[in-house]
Image (spheres, rainbow, N blue to C red):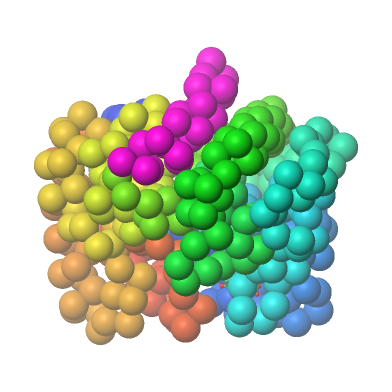
Amino acid sequence: MNEAFLKACRGEATRPVPVWLMRQAGRYLPAYQEIREKIDFLTLCKTPELAAEVSVQPVDILGVDAAILFSDILIPVEAMGMGLDFYEGEGPALTPPIRTEKDLKGLRSIDPAVDVPFVLETVRILKKELSNRVPLIGFSGAPFTLAAYMIEGGTSRSFANTKRMIFESPSLFSPLMDLITEVTISYLRAQIEAGVQAIQIFDTWAGILTKEDYSRYALPYVSRVFKGLEGLGIPGIYFVYDGGHLLESTPGSGADVIGLDWRTDMETAISRLGPNVTVQGNLDPCDLFMPEDELRAKVDSILRQGQKAKAHIFNLGHGILPEISYEKARLMVDLVHELSA
Ligand code: CP3
């Protein structure tokens, strides 16, 4: 097996540097689009053979050093009792939004084996199909990010409903976060028992909080999730999108690896995190529009800066965009391997 990714997760600096891409299974790949022409996104998530197939695509096509389970962070939220839809170009819709005591009462905890069996089946099929070529990453949303989606009923510009609940109805926000945290722990545990070899927690919306609010209303729940998985021996990555102002707090999550978005350059991020932290990131996804020589220089610069960390896993600073050509993504993977060899 290609151990580079797992070694780096454990803090061992490796040459070449391992690389994978957030959202590496997705619409920028013609092979993915071909499957999506026949089946909608949610059905794809719930059809293990096909979900496994699209997870393997970037391993075959790009040569990345890890596969990630094909699913979505909102799948367990649907299992908790909310209606979930994805509208083309608009993102997810969750109904009804959680705003009152009564809405909260309508949510339930989940038993992953019963409520999301297709996720665990996808992991089992993937393990067979990857046959130890590269490790498999499982994932979940962070409790705060899931709560924000649930309270807003989708994405939002200001997240006013979420902040309103935090400040106006703490007696509602706190049990909601407790429930999501418990669900997240059992969901990730089930993925680990089914065979994933690392996990990543995506905190897409924590960046809307001030540093002080983040440390009260988001971070403690993430650290409860990582604590709840301690002893299973599986490394954890924690990625906060647009969380430059939160960097110093994130190692407090207990994650083994801190994912960096592209806004803070790697060198600055490492100096703020300290040299004992393993980092993942952080090429601006739009840098994949650059011509080859400029992209090469960018990749080289990030690799050089990454040497100052305990270990480095190369990635984008957020998900790959559908507008990117897969040839360019493959070039990036090749450049990482070549320049860090
Ligand atoms: O990384 C991977 O390749 C694994 C699969 C994966 C998906 N979503 C598939 C997906 C992962 C890890 C996610 C995580 C996810 N989902 C996040 C956290 C990462 C981030 O982007 O910040 C979030 C916020 C979501 C919620 C979500 N799912 C949104 C906002 C959208 C719509 C946006 C869009 O691009 O259309 C999705 C849909 C989604 N999830 C797609 C994929 C491949 C596109 C669906 C399609 O049309 O085929």
* Dominant secondary structure, magenta: helix
Horizontal side of residue 16 vs 207, given as left or right: left
Q: Position of residue 179 (x, y in %)?
A: 67, 35
The mark tally for this picture is 0
Q: Quadrant of residue 190?
A: top right
Residue at 81% from the left image edge and 33% from the top image edge: 111
Residue farthest right in this picture: 114
- The front one of 330 and 241 is 241
Residue 237 in view, yes or no:
no
Q: Position of residue 282 (x, y in %)?
A: 29, 58
- The front one of 48 and 175 is 175
Horizontal side of residue 260 vs 255, given as left or right: left
- The front one of 180 and 114 is 180
Residue 34 in view, yes or no:
yes
Residue farthest top in this picture: 231
Horizontal side of residue 114 vs 189, given as left or right: right
When the figure is inspected, residue 258 is found, relative to residue 145, above or below; the finding is above
Residue at 45% from the left image edge and 31% from the top image edge: 220
Q: Quadrant of residue 237?
A: top left
Q: Position of residue 7 (x, y in %)?
A: 37, 32
Residue at 81% from the left image edge and 65% from the top image edge: 43
Is 142 one of the magenta-colored residues? no
Quarter holding ligand 1: bottom right
Is 227 one of the magenta-colored residues? yes
Q: Position of residue 163 (x, y in %)?
A: 48, 54
Residue at 67% from the left image edge and 54% from the top image edge: 99
Q: Which residues are magenta?
A: 212-235
